[in-house]
Amino acid sequence: MAQVSAPVATTGYRPHPTETMLAAQWHGTKSIKVGEVPKPTITAPKDAIVRVTHCTICGSDLHMYAGALNKVMEKGLIMGHEAIGIVEEVGPSVQKLQVGDRVIILPVIACGDCFYCKRKEFSLCDKTNPSLELEQMYGHRLSGIFGYSMITGGYPGDQAEYCRVPNADLVCVKAPKDTPAKSLLGLADVTPTAWHGNELAEVGKGDVVGVWGCGAVGLSIQRLALLRGARKVYAVDKDPDRLRIAESFGMVPIDVSAHPNVADYILSLEPHGLDRGIEASGFRSTNSVIHSTMRALGIEGDSSDTVSAVIKATRKGGNVALIGDFFYDTNKFPIGMLMEKAITLRGGQLFAEKYFPYLLDLVVRGEYDPAFLFTHEEKFENIPEMYAAFNDHQVPGGLKVCLVTPFGRSQV
């Protein structure tokens, strides 16, 4: 537990003296265990305690599960940053939420008052992450994030029966009680991340878009790009099942296994190039022997295979967005190509709070439904097995699992 500025006050929580809960805890590489830990209580005046009904595993959780972030992890950290639930208790300074409200817990913990929060760049918040290590790495700290390593604050996550939500008026989104749970759970992180990717790339009417990655975020970026008026969307991946899902939603699938020089292949189809290229697979994605070898030997932290392909396939003066996670450094980055083609490159974690209530309203009006993301439902208690299945691309249906807590099951 570390101290941070008000209104969040601390990264940890005041434990209940007698009551406990089940929580998914990190114990090392490929080791997630369901442990019994103290239930959180109100720790700062703007806190809410949310009783979780549904949660899920994010693709970025796999970075920690697979061991890529071991040096910034702590044994026992409660995992997770995608959940919905019911407000059980609120602090004395909470104004917008009441006990009994159904809420989406957003992943980004922001103060709401600093320079960046006032610009609605909430994941750049100056006040919620005490990590000196991150400041040394990047020159600045970013926001706190639930359950996402010590360099994002070490906050206990929401793959648990209860979650302490700091600054709850901002970090929670009140949701209708008649909206299906999977539709709301898809709004916790995946949908705002996908919308953020489209915003970074400035996807608009008539654009030709390429999205590298057909996981939950990649597919969501593709669907939302069409919603924003894109004329054509290419879906790039190696997984034939996920490519079939993309094609069923109207995308043009490109199998990297069949077209290893994927940028050249796209340019053979689109000589002008992509208007917008979006990388949604992240630092572990490799397609060349060079980058696979450098990562295996520890010569580079992040692979730039996909980023290089995106830049090459994007037209002169186009936009490239990085929404897949990148953390460290890379080699053989095509800086000359980026500069000479006058490409605008942007990245960053989602500005989650900025996109509400807009995205919730889209779902409530029936204009978009992220429930498609959840191709399997499972008891929360089986989350260790689901981490292994997700990591091995063995989740039934091929996408995400919706994990239902005992309390969530009692609400049916």
Image (tube, rainbow, N blue to C red):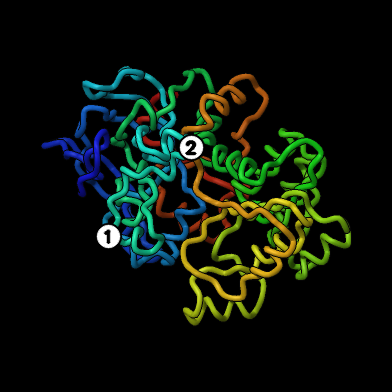
Q: Label 1, on which residue?
A: 75
On the image, the x and y values in percent for residue 371 come to 59, 34
Q: Residue at x 52, y 68 (%)?
A: 302
Label 2 vs 1, first from the N-terminus: 1
CB of mark 2 within 8 Å of CB of mark 1? no
Q: Tell me the residue at 81%/38% (across/down).
A: 206
Q: Nearer the viewer, mark 2 or mark 1?
A: 2
Look at the picture and state if 278 lies above or below 6. Answer: below
**Percent x, y of residue 308:** 67, 66
Question: Most extreme residue toward the left, as rendered?
Answer: 17
Residue ID for mark 2:
352
Q: Answer above or below: position of 302 versus 197.
A: below
Secondary structure type for disc 2: helix
Q: Secondary structure at mark 1?
A: loop
Check the image and report above or below for 254 versus 100. below
Quadrant in the rendering for residue 165: top left
The C terminus sits in image quarter = top left
Residue type, mark 2 in image: Ala
Residue 387 visible in image: yes
Give 368 or 276, whichever is nearer the viewer.
Answer: 276
Residue 364 found in image quarter: top right
